[in-house]
Amino acid sequence: MSDINRQKIVDSVPQKGFFGHPKGLFTLFFTEFWERFSYYGMRAILIYYMYYEVSKGGLGLDQSTALAIMSIYGSLVYMSGVIGGWLADRVFGTSKALFYGGILIMIGHIVLSLPGNLTMLFVSMVFIVIGTGLLKPNVSSVVGDMYAPEDNRRDAGFSIFYMGINLGAFLSPLLVGEVAKTSFHLGFAIAAVGMLLGLIVFVLTKKKNLGLAGTFVPNPLSPAEKKKVSLIVGISVVVLAVILGTTIPAGIFTLDVFITLVGIFGITIPTIYFIVMYRSPKTTATERSRIIAYIPLFIASVMFWAIQEQGSTILAVYADKRTDLEFAGITISPAWFQSLNPLFIIALAPLFAWIWVKLGDRQPTVPKKFALSLLFAGLSFLVILLPAYFGGEDSLVNPLWLVLSYFIVVIGELLLSPVGLSATTKLAPAAFSAQTMSLWFLSSAAAQAINAQIVKFYSAETEMMYFGTIGGVAILLSLFLFVISPKIQEFMKGIR
């Protein structure tokens, strides 16, 4: 986007009105609040809906299959963000991407709220995956559009916006989890209503509060490019329809094959990104060195998210089947544990921000922060071993053990997630700044694609081996990363 257009956008947005920030921050705060409310509310109960018996309102799927589907779902959501960002940049702008994405997400939740079968589940997943890919990466871009590059309110504005994300993620499992005790479909309906509220806030306030933010298409397709893209998309759709139409009835394209393919894409796509950026003539020698430094950080990120994202799969099952849900005189919904991650982030993020400011130049380097994050991720899984080790595999576990596990992994998340975002912007080659940010989010997609392959090994009988192996591997990788951190720092060429 040109500097002239950027200035037009900033000038069009009312700059005072929401805690001293542009009025548009109110619109985006509550749009994202309700979008996250809907997504995390759905995610908190989806695994139970899939593997609960039909007599209990579920689909009656095998637990391992349900866990794999859940992981693939998360992987595809992150992969779709690459497509959503491209459509916003080249076709219809971020504002329309937000609106279209919200509509698709709402439709997906509505489909889930209707009594159905496995086919309807997959239909809803398509809507929600595409919708989230359109909305999630672009809403952050609009936040940035409202501030001039030199505006010192920018970081604080993103912090307020981030609070909206976590508030929605915190509240929805509590409400949806309670309602799901009566009906899964009613819980999904609440998620649909949440997205509807987000769309209402966006539509009613965007003209007044957002001005021109999100309306410009930064790099629009030329007429020739539009024809070429339309032809490629049309051919791809026809070819895909033919392949699926012939292989599914023949029993060739099965769910297991699909899960395997997503796993391959989850690893292949980031690999291609690295190769293309490194070999590009637009990449300087210094930038190539920084790409090499970024590779171990990316691998560490994949390992971390592989553990953290199991909070909605393996730990969700653990909460349901291995945890004593009668605590302090109340009956806990297993879905409530999904609120712990955003709750701890809200509580601890200001503390970590203060620590980094206080330490200044004495704070750990980026590679060492990543190493520490892996250490905490591994410990969060080893903690789950203790109650089974001391109390036996058949006894129900005190819920505080699960709370402790979530708490420990959040410490790791705060050492990796904001640090990784910042490091990505610093290490990215100038010609690939946007693609490198997409690459960062693909680490979560790769992690969940890998999870889809390994969650099938979890069961009550293999519980200790499962948590011990994954936790141990994370700790070993943490130690290795700590040892080579000076070399990584050297390749970063002055970036801390």
Image (cartoon, grey):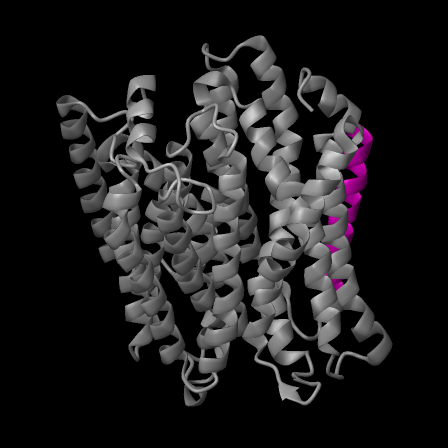
**What residue appears at the point 80 percent right and 29 percent down from the top-left corner?**
362
Residue 55 visible within the image? yes
211 above or below 473? above
Please provide percent x and percent y for residue 91: 23, 34
Q: Main secondary structure of the magenta part?
A: helix
Q: Quadrant of residue 417?
A: top right
Residue furthest to the right? 390
Q: State the quadrant of the C terminus.
A: top right
Q: Is residue 242 magenta?
A: no
**What residue appears at the point 52 percent right and 26 percent down from the top-left corner?**
274
284 above or below 484? above
Q: Nearer the viewer, residue 171 or 423?
A: 171
Please provide percent x and percent y for residue 153: 50, 34
Q: Is residue 466 magenta?
A: yes
**What residue appears at the point 78 percent right and 67 percent down from the top-left corner?**
385
Q: Nearer the viewer, residue 331 or 222?
A: 331
Q: State the quadrant of the N terminus.
A: top left
Residue 257 visible within the image? no
How many numbered discs?
Answer: 0
Please indicate whether residue 271 sits to the left or right of residue 243 in the image: right
Please provide percent x and percent y for residue 443: 54, 41
**What residue appears at the point 33 percent right and 41 percent down from the top-left corner?**
84
Q: Nearer the viewer, residue 142 or 300?
A: 142
Highlighted range, magenta: 465-484
Q: Quadrant of residue 321?
A: bottom right
Please indicate whether residue 305 sits to the left or right of residue 262 in the image: right
Q: Quadrant of residue 427?
A: top right
Please indicate whether residue 241 sits to the left or right of residue 130 in the image: left
